Amino acid sequence: MAGFRDSAGQQSTVDAYIVVDFHSRKILTAHAAEKQRQVASLTKIVSAMVVLDWAQLTRADLSELATVPASAARIGGPNRMNLRPGERISLRDGLYCALIGSDNWAAETVADHVGRDLLVRGDGKQASSPVAEFIKQMNALAERQGATGSLFTNSHGMDHQGSLPYSTAADIARLAIYALGKPSFTFFCSQKERRVSVQGDAGVRQFIIQNTNKLLGKDSIDGIKTGMTRQAGPCLAISADRAAIVTELPDGRTRVTPRRLIVVVLGASDRFSAARTLLLGGWEKFDAWNSGGRLILNPAELLSGSKD
């Protein structure tokens, strides 16, 4: 476990963390980044990407209604909309609820809906249930992105039942880099709040879902996801950008260097303070590395990525 002080002089501890440049994949600082542990609702980054990739490939409409499955009632954890099996919610609203509200029932609902379609389109190696098929795709996506230290056993990140899921700070950063490469994901996770609708026997209910990321909008932070369970502790993945660096080259050309950092903290005593402190320190390290010629002396300085 690492300890450091934030800008207010408060001591923070973090079990594992990583700060990485989105564009170059340069690791700016890290501690126990490959340590396997629970990551709670950071899992929903992967779930959302399976849904969005599926929608893009099949040209599915995110306004499709998904039915809350009976399996959702066995999850536990946040159910802020008081969903009930048999009620219906659009895939779009389900993603908002899962990503910015961290709702487990919503994550299970979109997983069940997409998993059913995946089974219909199956490759002959079908899983035992729609959700199991969806989880299979989550792990396949993780493997393709080089997140080989991870095993996802559900769509939401709860870790008190069944096989224990796990990942690493480095793997979450790998998956976040992939997710933030998709404008649709970036839009979802950057919303401070969203009005969503649920269709049930009593009619349509509407809710305002608030983003659980308290850092959103501060220091140019525009995502990504919070998470917390008893085993994982408080977890957070954030992203932030700054204006690109424009450099005039000797030959008269102009070089533009974009700047975006990703910070992942796992098992933090104060996840928001720790992530912000690491972000601000990360900017200092990035600018020093960039002005020093962006030297890479060892391949291990870069976060490995996609196997595609």
Image (cartoon, grey):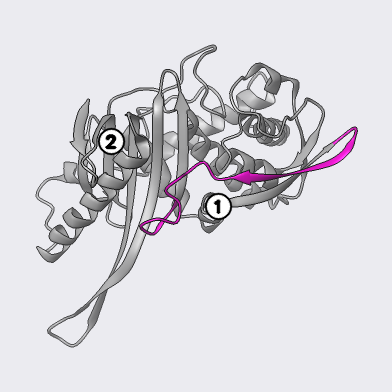
Q: Do callouts 1 and 2 mark residues in contact (Cβ within 8 Å)? A: no
Q: Say whether residue 210 is magenta.
A: yes
Residue at the spot of label 2? 17
**Bounds of the magenta span?**
200-222
Disc 1 vs disc 2: which is toward the camera? 1
Instruction: Write down the quadrant of residue 120 in the picture.
Output: top right
Q: Position of residue 70 (x, y in %)?
A: 75, 20
Q: Is residue 236 above or below residue 35?
A: below
Residue depicted at x 55% and y 33%: 137
Pick the quarter of the image with the N terminus: top left
Give the crowd class for mark 1: few <14, some 14-19, many >=20 residues within 10 Å: some
Instruction: Write down the quadrant of residue 129 in the picture.
Output: top right
- Give amino acid for label 1: Lys
- Give amino acid for label 2: Tyr
State the mark number for residue 192: 1
Give the spatial CA distance, label 1 vs label 2.
Answer: 25 Å
Tell me the element at label 2. strand
